[in-house]
Amino acid sequence: MNAVRIPQPMGRPRTRPQRLAGDKGYSYPRIRTWLREHGIAAVIPQRDDQIVHHRGRPIELDKKTYRRRSMIECCVGWLKECRAIATRFEKLAVNFLAMLKLALIQRYLRILDSSDRA
């Protein structure tokens, strides 16, 4: 989270996102507390065992924002198909990041090429 830099139309980039979306695996009080302390809205559904034992005001889930996670999930799923990234051939972080960027460029070019043919 400390590496986040969100460009703004004017001024320096923001270092904190407005919202953070995660699946039920991130639904822990410690994570929700950290997000609240840093002014980040949690878009994380509660696990079934938490709903039963939850006290106080129910935790609301912004379903519209949560659905947008699918774009990221699809991208991560596609990246896992890239063998060099999935098996992490590159051990140095700098080289791994370069391979990741190359894979995303390749994907972007493939999408552009398919839209030109349509």
Image: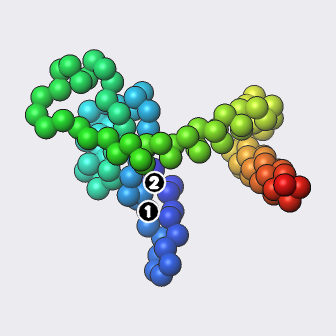
Q: Residue at x 71, y 38 (%)?
A: 79
Q: Is residue 94 visible?
A: yes
Q: Pointer 1: what residue?
A: 15
Q: Nearer the viewer, residue 63 or 88?
A: 63
Indicate the quadrant where residue 17 lies: bottom left
Please give the label number shown on residue 2. 2
Disc 1 to disc 2, C-alpha distance: 7 Å
What colour scheme governs how the chains and residues are painted in the rendered image of this protein? rainbow
* Residue 31 screen position, x and y as percent: 33, 37
Please give the label number shown on residue 75. none
Count of numbered badges drawn on the protein? 2
What SS does tag 1 mark?
A: loop
Q: Residue furthest front?
A: 118
What SS does tag 2 mark?
A: loop
* Residue 23 screen position, x and y as percent: 44, 33
Q: Residue at x 52, y 70 (%)?
A: 7
Q: How many C-alpha atoms fall within 10 Å of the one at disc 1: few (<14), some, or many (≥20)? A: few
94 left or right of 20? right
Q: Nearer the viewer, mark 1 or mark 2?
A: 1
- Rendered-image quadrant of the C terminus: bottom right
Q: Is residue 32 above or below residue 105?
A: above
* Residue 96 screen position, x and y as percent: 73, 44
Residues tagged 1 and 2 counted as in contact (Cβ below 8 A): yes
Q: Nearer the viewer, residue 59 or 103?
A: 59
Q: Amino acid at mark 2?
A: Asn
52 left or right of 15? left
Q: Residue at x 10, y 34 (%)?
A: 56
